[in-house]
Image: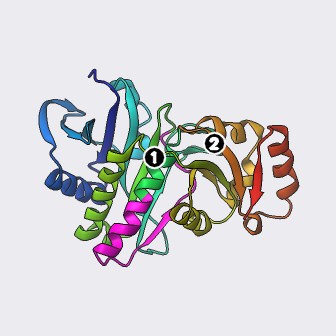
Amino acid sequence: MEAKNIILVVASKKDAASINITKKILEHYPFQKTITSYQGNPIYNATIADREVKLIILNEESIYAQNLPDSFSNLKIVIFISRHSSVSGTPTLSVHPPGNLGEKAELGGLPRKISISPANAMKNTLKAMAKLKEEMNRNYEVSYECTHHGPSLNVPAMFAELGSSPTQWSDSNAAEVVANATMEAVSKIGKFQDKVALGIGGPHYNMKFTRMALESEIAFGHIIPKYAISWINVEILQQCFERTLEKTELAILDWKGIKGEDKPRLVDMLKELGIQWKKV
C-alpha cells in the first residue's frame, strides 16, 4: 500500500458514532471505493485540497490499532473518528492525542508511551467544531481532552470524537459537524503553524486550554491532567515535548489545577529539562 504522505482517516465497525461520522464523510466528500481492502473492509480514496486521503474501517476498536502503521507507508497523520464516552453524558465534541502517560495500558497502546501529537491539526479541528456546531445549532461543548488511551503510535495521531452517550452517537447533525471539522482540518494540514505548548494541570477536559486555543495563537500538543501529574517523570515529560509534530516552545501550567504537593517536583523537572514555562 505505497503512497506519498497519506492522510489516513480511521473508523471502527464497533463504534456507532464512528460509523455515523463515516457515512457523512462519504456522503459529502469525493471518496471512491478502491479494489483494495483492510481487515476485509474496502479502502476509500479521495484528493482533498491536493492531499491524498484514505479512509479505512477497522473491525476492532480504534484504541487497539497499535499495529496499524505497519500496513501503510508514508503516513503523514492518522485521524481516528470516534465516539466519546463519559459518565455525565454531556454532549461533547472533543479532540486529543492518544497514548499512555502512566504504567497502565488498559485501553490499548503501550505503557508510558505516547503518540506523536499533531498540535495544529487538533487545533484546526477544534476551531472547526466550535464554528460548525453554532452554524448547525447543536448544543454541544467543544473541548480538548488530555492525552489518554491507545494506541501509542510513532506517527502523528489524533482522535476527533462525538459524545458522550448513545443519544449523541446517533445525532446525525452532530456526526456531520465532526465529519466536516475533520475534513476541514485535513485540508489545512501544513498550512498553519501556531505557537505550540504542552498543557499541564486541570481536569480531563481543560476549558482554559480550549479557550486559549480558540482565542489566541496557541496550539496545544499533549495535555497532562491534574490526576496524572503524580505519574510523570522526566522521561515522560521529555516525551511530551519530543513526541509532538511541531516544535513545542513552552509548557503552560494550569496552576490552580495542580495539587500543591506536585508543584515543586513538576517545576524541578521542567528546570532540569530547560523548558520555559508559565502559569495561567
Residue 248: mark:
2
Query: Which image quadrant for residue 210?
Result: bottom right
- Look at the picture and state if 163 lies above or below 244: below
Q: How far, Cα to Cα, is label 1 from label 2?
A: 15 Å
- Look at the picture and state if 262 lies above or below 109: below
Q: Earlier in the sequence, mark 1 or mark 2?
A: 1
Would you say residue 73 sits in the magenta stretch?
A: no
Residue that carries the numbered disc 1 in the rendered image: 192
| Secondary structure under the numbered disc 1 in the rendered image | loop
Residue 77 point in image, percent of width and height: 40, 37
Front-lying residue, 172 or 65: 172
Residue 5 point in image, percent of width and height: 35, 29
- Within 10 Å of disc 1 (Cα), the crowding (few <14, some 14-19, many 20+) is few
Residue at position x 19%, y 34% in the image: 40
Residue at position x 52%, y 48% in the image: 149
Residue 232 visible: yes
Magenta range: 126-151
Residue 165: mark:
none
Residue 245 point in image, percent of width and height: 53, 37
Residue found at the far top of this picture: 2
Query: Which image quadrant for residue 100?
Result: top right
Front-lying residue, 67 or 171: 171
Would you say residue 128 sits in the magenta stretch?
A: yes
Horizontal side, residue 2 vs residue 90: left or right: left
**Of tags 1 and 2, which is closer to the observer?**
1
